[in-house]
Amino acid sequence: MIYTIKPEYHAIPELTRILEEHPEIQFVSFMGVDIGGNGTDEKIPVKLFIKDMDEMLKYGIQTDGSSVELQGIADLNNARIDILPDLDCNWFVDYNYEHYDDENGLPVGTLKIPSFIIHGGKQVCSRSILKRATSNFKSQILEIMKKNPHIPQSLGFKYEDVEEVLLTSATELEMWVKTPEQRADFEELHTSQVLKEQYWKRTMGTVRTVLEKIMAQLELYDLKPEMAHKEVGGIANKIDAKGRITHVMEQLEIDWRFSESLQTADNEIFVRELIEDQFRHHGLEVLFKAKPIEGVAGNGEHTHLGVAVRLKNGKRVNIFAPENIRKDYLSEIGYGALMGLLKNYEVINPIATATNDAFNRLKPGFEAPVCIVTSLGGTKEAPSRNRSVLVGVIRDVNNPNSVRFELRSPNPYSNTYLVIAASYQAMLDGIKSVAEAGLSCGDLEKEISKKYGEDAVYLEKYREYRSEEDVFEKYSEEERNKLYGKAPATVWENLNEFSSSMLKQQALKSGDVFTDELLNSFKESTLQKWKNELKGRIIHDNIMLLKTFVKLHDEQDHATDLDVVNWERIIYLKTKLMKDSMTKKCIFTKIKTALSQGDYDTASDLQKQMNEKMTEIRKLYIEYKNNIF
């Protein structure tokens, strides 16, 4: 069995030989990734692929836009799209361990080929946007170094010494794993989290077995696994009379080594599918949602971003790291990149936080990064980690090559291609400004540490951007909103912020990386998903939950005045949320009406009211239930 086919083996003779030597590979799938971050999957018989390989590798395959998210691009009257294989990345063999070949006894494999989606002769997919972003960043950085020779000289080399610019990225994938159809008690989950009873604890039983299998498989795919461990959420498993583990409810994290940016995003899609397949094969369900369980820790996907150069002598230099890491936090390029990320975050946030589920996670109190602020990491000699900020600066004074940024807002369903592309575009905007200003590292440290109302060269006057404190403990909500800007609370507010940030959108459009056509397609796709999910799923699920909140007390149960008061409040909230009368409409009905009429401001405001009242009634019903004999 083979697990990857690297670029050097993508020539037709080599590829034909490999496929003929491995008859367990029976299908080929071209994986294009649309604006919504969805990977396409087809089953092309490998015999047909070998027969038509020259044409397929050169021209790809054709389909229509109804199968992908390309709103405003692949319309009904012009729906043809082509899916063209990328010959310059790793291809994966996806094995089905529930289907074994009758002749060789091996699991049937599908060769997954990351591809580009093309419409009207233009690449219009998430993969192509990230490819353009990395190409643009590399060429612009070289141009900046050429025009400003003091910048590479401050890092110990000359422009002429550079062989290649390297953009490295990595993601940390968090998930909840549970037994299907079995639920854990919310209070038990919440208490376990507060006590940190599960964080980094030993895994057992099926979960341990599957984690070990996943780590072994990542090694086979040359993805270089680094760590798998329990996260803060979850409770201890239960064992039935036959010694079988039941009621699994655990939060886990799996990490693997960084890669070149486009490969990082490809790897993540494949790893997520591999994890789902392995846990499902062992009877467990995986939840990658940002907030699978209300009131308990959600799933983040911290995204790491770094830049280095490879010199002609083979040496690798991290250009975010200063020449003397004990004297300065970052290099000039590093400060510029960090400031660009922060200043332009209003146009990154709608990409990183594009769903209702994502906003369920981004609330104060759960280490959720809702403030546009960074921490440089305590003192220069002893770096620290501030978990309350949006962007963390990762530093190790003994290893300058480790310097990078950790964007903490994405979740496992964020479109990693677009998040990384937007981040590098924003960083490039800051680097250009810093280079033009000619500021020293000391000046740049003062700039990013500026106080509210102080003038700045690049950053905004009425904002602060750095805090070494816990921003949720140090400041009130009013103070945070003043210093760091008020964070959007719904998808619609996020899209509104994006639309009003026209100047910052130019950072994304630089080098024709994001075009107006692609940005409009993303906004329309995000808007439609917000509307349809809110109307067709969230309200429905809330109704089903509210119907389970039934009266539990009567005169025979020694009901107290507290029981009566709590139940009356529950009835009031249920009525307010879901019950219409001849003269009054409930919140759910008002939301549906507003969405139907295109009044998205009202729908968004009502969604916030709904969320607040649903949180209140959940807590109130637990209190009520616990007081009944």
Image (spheres, grey):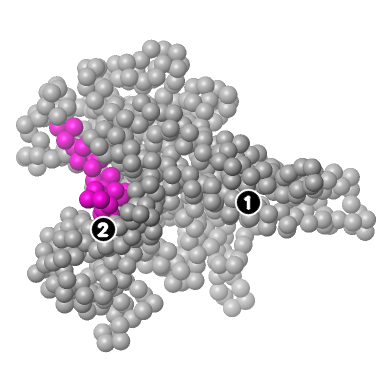
The disc label shown at residue 82, or none? 2
**Residue 63 makes an appearance in the image:** yes
Q: Residue at x 55, y 44 (%)?
A: 360
Crowding at dot 1, Cα within 10 Å, few <14 / some 14-19 / many 20+, comes out as many
Q: Classify mark 2: helix, strand or loop.
A: strand
**Residue 623 makes an appearance in the image:** no
Q: Quadrant of residue 526?
A: top left
Between residue 137 and residue 181, name the one nearer to us: 137
Q: Quadrant of the C terminus?
A: bottom right
Residue 122 position in % (x across, y down): 24, 48
Between residue 474 and residue 60, name the one nearer to us: 60
- Main SS class of the magenta portion in the image: helix
Extreme-bottom residue of the structure: 103
Q: Residue at x 68, y 54 (%)?
A: 543
Q: Amino acid at mark 1?
A: Ile
Is label 1 or label 2 in front?
2
Residue 451 position in % (x across, y down): 43, 16
- Residue 421 drawn above or below residue 267: above
- Left or right, 529 with reference to 7: right
Residue 602 position in % (x across, y down): 61, 36
Q: Which residues are magenta?
A: 116-142
Q: Residue at x 82, y 56 (%)?
A: 551
Q: Amino acid at mark 2?
A: Asp
